[in-house]
Amino acid sequence: MSAPAQATDIVFTRHAAGRGVAWLRESWAMFGRARLPWLALIALYYLVILLANWIAGVVHPVAGQVATMLLKPVFAVGLLAAAWSQERGERPRPRDLFRGFSANLGALLTLGAALVAGVFAALATASLIAGSLLAEVFAGPQPPPEELLGNARLQFALLAGATVALPVMLALWFAPALVVFQDASARTALGASLRAALANWKPIAVYALAVFAFGAVLPVMAAQVMIALFPAQAAVTVVQVLLAAWGLMLAATLHISDYVSYRDIFHAGETLAPLDRGGRGPH
């Protein structure tokens, strides 16, 4: 199959809202079939990201953040490759994480540059509106005081920044997968991802709400109940450990869902090709 020349060459499926929950359910099931390999892979991913941030941060703190954003699409391909292999009977392996370095690295770094540009555009927009208030949020005490967070100007600035960032995030949602699985250029992948994400805004919105529920609302509620029932410091420590473990499992599930949602939207109904035992997997 020849590489798509433009975004409109890439066909996708429009799904109903309920598919957003199905993506999470199917991803959790994949994680459950290989818990330890996925936890090891995700732990390695965050360790490598922190190391890259630290190394680049020696030059300048902003350089560390830029380096991690540039590398995120590259490592995203490694996690996609792990899910691709698992779906064909293999198990996720630590070396999968680095598959992106041999899969159109130039296009993936371009996606990283798009992420950097989107983040800085969002921050610039918010800063232009909020002025010094935004600096107080990031430079002041953690967490920021309630009176600062309740400032209407700051809230509007954050909303404006999120509005600027949203199209970039949607354009990057499926872009790494399109680069590695469909040989799309960075520009084509960004355009196709944005088109497909906008067409599937309903399942994506449901997915986002489900992630918020499982990633924020339920853990906070569970932690508050447990601490209220067992207020001893040892119980607090246990709650913190449990929350960290849950966060790692949820992170693995969300990374798997990048692959599950990509396949559902761009390859709906397709039969899986057998794994080439002597080959390379995703190119």
Image (cartoon, rainbow, N blue to C red):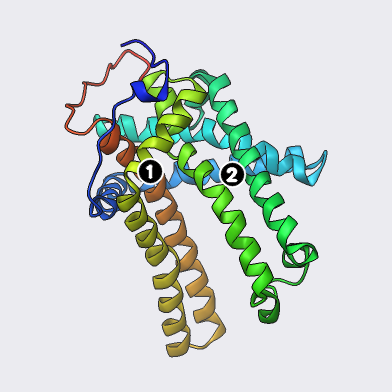
In terms of secondary structure, where does tag 1 sit?
helix
Mark 1 or 2: the one toward you: 1
* Circle on res. 166: none
Query: Alpha carbon of mark 1 to alpha carbon of mark 2: how far?
Result: 33 Å
> Residue 111: x, y in percent?
55, 31
58 vs 143, nearest the viewer: 143
Q: Residue at x 72, y 67 (%)?
A: 137
Earlier sequence position, callout 1 versus callout 2: 2
Q: For the residue marked with disc 1, what is the amino acid?
A: Leu
Quadrant, the C terminus: top left
The answer to whether residue 129 is above or below residue 185 is below
Q: Residue at x 56, y 83 (%)?
A: 233
The answer to whether residue 264 is above or below residue 147 is above
Q: Which residue is mark 2?
A: 47
- State the image quarter where residue 116 is shown: top right
Q: Residue at x 42, y 78 (%)?
A: 221
Q: Are marks 1 and 2 in contact (CB under 8 Å)?
A: no
Q: Which residue is mark 1?
A: 198
Q: For the residue marked with disc 2, what is the amino acid?
A: Leu
17 sits to left or right of 3: left
Mark 1 residue crowding within 10 angstroms, few (<14) / some (14–19) / many (20+): some
The answer to whether residue 83 is above or below residue 272 is below
> Residue 192: x, y in percent?
40, 30
